[in-house]
Image (spheres, grey):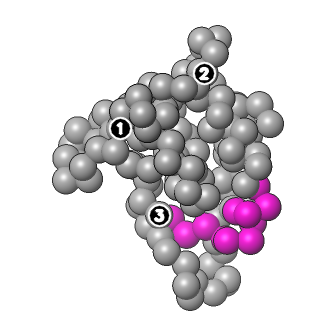
Amino acid sequence: MELTEKSVLSVYAHCLLHHEEPTKCITPIDGVYHRGILLHPGRLETHREAIAELIAQLGPSFDENHGGQYLMDARKRGDGTGNWTEHDTTVDMLFILGQGINLLKHVTDKGTAPLVRSGAALISRV
């Protein structure tokens, strides 16, 4: 799956837990901008491979051994061909999906909220 804003929005929307679905045993996920997001485990698992493909296109700078990368820099394609989105909130959706399948994590201390919410949150692959 190609890393585009449309593909991330589509996968994210499909994985969101609906109001009528049970929330028992589902841990809320905190992104940088979006907090307490509930994802449907089955639908998330269905999209595991696609999410992994999207994250792989961010490039090697998101690897943990590189110290992670700033959320705002994740708008850029890893191959240097430009931005796949102009919106940090869309990047945050990909970050949440990545956390949901244990491929991405926060590196920045969550106590630095003003800095984090400005897009300066460090994220990395697990």
Q: Which residue corresponds to mark 1? A: 122
Q: Distance between the residues labelled 3 and 2?
A: 24 Å
The numbered mark, 3 or 1, whose residue comes first in the sequence reads 3
Q: Is residue 85 visible?
A: no
- At 48% from the left and 32% from the top, the residue drawn is 62
State which mark lies toward you, 3 or 1: 1
Q: Distance between the residues labelled 3 and 1?
A: 16 Å
Q: Nearer the viewer, residue 18 or 74?
A: 74
At a point 36% along the width and 33% down the height, the residue shown is 67
Residue 44 shows which numbered tag? none
Residue 55 falls inside the magenta stretch: no
Is residue 16 left or right of 123 when viewed as pictured? Answer: right
Q: Position of residue 54 (x, y in %)?
A: 68, 37
Q: What stretch is highlighted in magenta?
A: 37-47
Q: To which residue does mark 2 refer?
A: 77
* Residue occupying the point 70% across, 31% down: 4
Determine the image quadrant of residue 48.
bottom right
Identify the secondary structure beneath mark 1.
Answer: strand
Q: What element carries label 3?
A: loop
Residue 40 vs residue 104: left or right?
right
Residue 45 percent across, percent down from the top left: 73, 63
Residue drawn at the location 23% of the way across and 38% of the way down: 115
- The amino acid type found where label 1 is placed reads Leu
- Give the number of the disc on residue 29: 3
Q: Nearer the viewer, residue 121 or 61?
A: 61
When the figure is inspected, residue 84 is found, relative to residue 89, above or below; the finding is above
Task: Measure how far apart labels 1 and 2 are at the Cα level.
Answer: 17 Å
Task: Name which quarter of the figure residue 20 lies in.
Answer: bottom right
User: Which amino acid, by three-letter code, is at mark 2?
Assistant: Arg
| Residue 117 at x, y percent in the picture | 31, 42
Q: Pick whichever of labels 1 and 2 is earlier in the sequence.
A: 2
Q: Are marks 1 and 2 in contact (CB under 8 Å)?
A: no
